[in-house]
Amino acid sequence: MGKSTLLRQWQEAARRTDAVTAAVDENDVHGVQQALVELARQLAEQDGPCKDFDKAIEQLRREQAAQAEPSVEGEASVSSRVVAQAALGAASLVPGAGVVAALANPDTAAQGLDRLRSASRARGRRRGGLGDESGLSRAFVAELDRLCRRRQWVVLFFDTWEQTAQYLDGWLLRLLDEEFGPVPANVIVVLAGRDELAEREWAPLREQVADVPLEVFTATETRSLLTSRGVADPGVVEAVLQLSMGLPLLVELLALARPQSAEDVDASGDLADVAVERFVQWITDPDKREAVRACALPLQLNEDVFAAAAPPEAGGLWEWLCGQPFVSGRADFRHYHSVVRASMIRQQRARSPSDGPQHISGSPTPTPPGAPQSRKTFPRRNAGAIPSGADTAWTRPTTASARTLLPI
């Protein structure tokens, strides 16, 4: 199995022991704030509202909105002018204060209010108050402490660490170093990614990290999986072994297709593309086949995007698509495995370069609130021991690992 599949299984196992869990991946994370919001949302679904965190995020969003308010140098912000005018207007109604209110300049008062707000925000940042990411992290740790007083375990999962680490690696080190407050002993953090943790930065915590390396399937493991899928013909098994080279995702795709002969499997060309194309060809229902191809185009999927991307004849196939081994995700959003999606898009462009984009015109891919639009990054090539001329972009996940940070 791949690292993402292993993480899902671990999360299910943790919940069976009454643990509270939350998981994020590259689709949820575009910064510390987005990651914490998603983690807190999932924790709240299982154990009730995270009131301290909700208060902190609301304050942070108010301050971000105030900072984003357009203003011209030397002029007061709109909100400060409104407050100043209202305050002076109210003061004019107080007996004896009318003269003072009449002499006061509303613009000057508004500019003074802006300076007061700015100073207050600066003091809050220096104290690590609620109005910045440090304050948000402190509120999150407080929620973890609250949960751990009632539940035996709290487990936080971070998938695709090779992508999310650029936002979260430094923050997580600070969290585990208890910069935001004591982390309860029954909190477990699980990371899954292609690469090793940075040796220098993680050295102080190395004794608390348990590595679980995921290698390619051995020949025995590949044969066992094929047998469990009803693929027993020796020639077919050998052909799958040669084509997949033990990569779990490709073995699974070829096994699900249930080829009848070695000729069905043997092919020249790009290994990943051949495996994906064989899987698509062996889908006997033409509506399912077209739905699988069409839905590779959006970066993310939900039922609305599926309805727009898939042909009309594929109505009712959303649940079937979500059950495919290369489709993952949580809540309302799903996405294809990057290897499978890249392969399907390449094949569609080769077949008919103009069909795909026209088919889903006017149906933008959904992204989580606040997430910037970005292009997905695929694994870098690593030749290793792959035969000359073969596309090796898919080989990096074979050395992926899941890392568990044990209770501290």
Image: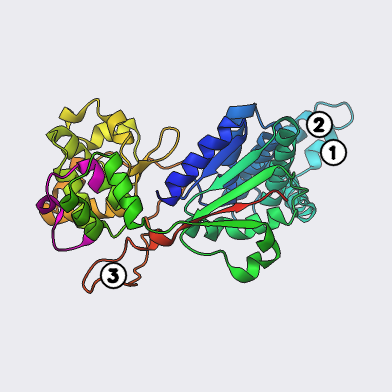
* Image coords of residue 263 (percent x, y): 10, 53
> Is disc 2 in contact with disc 1, using a CB cutoff of under 8 Å?
yes
Residue 101 can be seen, yes or no: yes
Using the image, determine if residue 152 lies above or below residue 31.
above
* Image coords of residue 345 (percent x, y): 22, 52
* Image coords of residue 243 (percent x, y): 22, 58
Q: What residue is rendered at 18% in x and 41% in y? A: 359
The amino acid beneath tag 3 is Ile
Of label 2 and label 1, which has the lower sequence position? 2
In this rendering, would 331 be left or right of 77? Answer: left
Residue 171 can be seen, yes or no: no
Q: Quadrant of residue 217?
A: bottom left
Q: Which residue is mark 1?
A: 100
Of label 3 and label 2, which has the lower sequence position? 2
Secondary structure category for the residue under label 1? helix
Q: CA distance from mark 2 to mark 1?
A: 8 Å
The amino acid beneath tag 2 is Ala
The amino acid beneath tag 1 is Val
Q: Which residue is mark 2?
A: 91
Q: Which residue is mark 3?
A: 386
In this rendering, would 244 be left or right of 268? Answer: right
Of residues 332 and 190, which is closer to you in this image?
190
Q: CA distance from mark 3 to mark 1?
A: 83 Å
Of residues 295 and 258, which is closer to you in this image?
258
What's drawn in magenta, residue-wise?
254-271
Q: CA distance from mark 3 to mark 2?
A: 80 Å
* Image coords of residue 84 (percent x, y): 72, 39
Secondary structure category for the residue under label 3? loop
> Is disc 3 in contact with disc 2, using a CB cutoff of under 8 Å?
no
> Is 258 covered by the magenta stretch?
yes
Secondary structure category for the residue under label 2? helix
Residue lying furthest right: 96
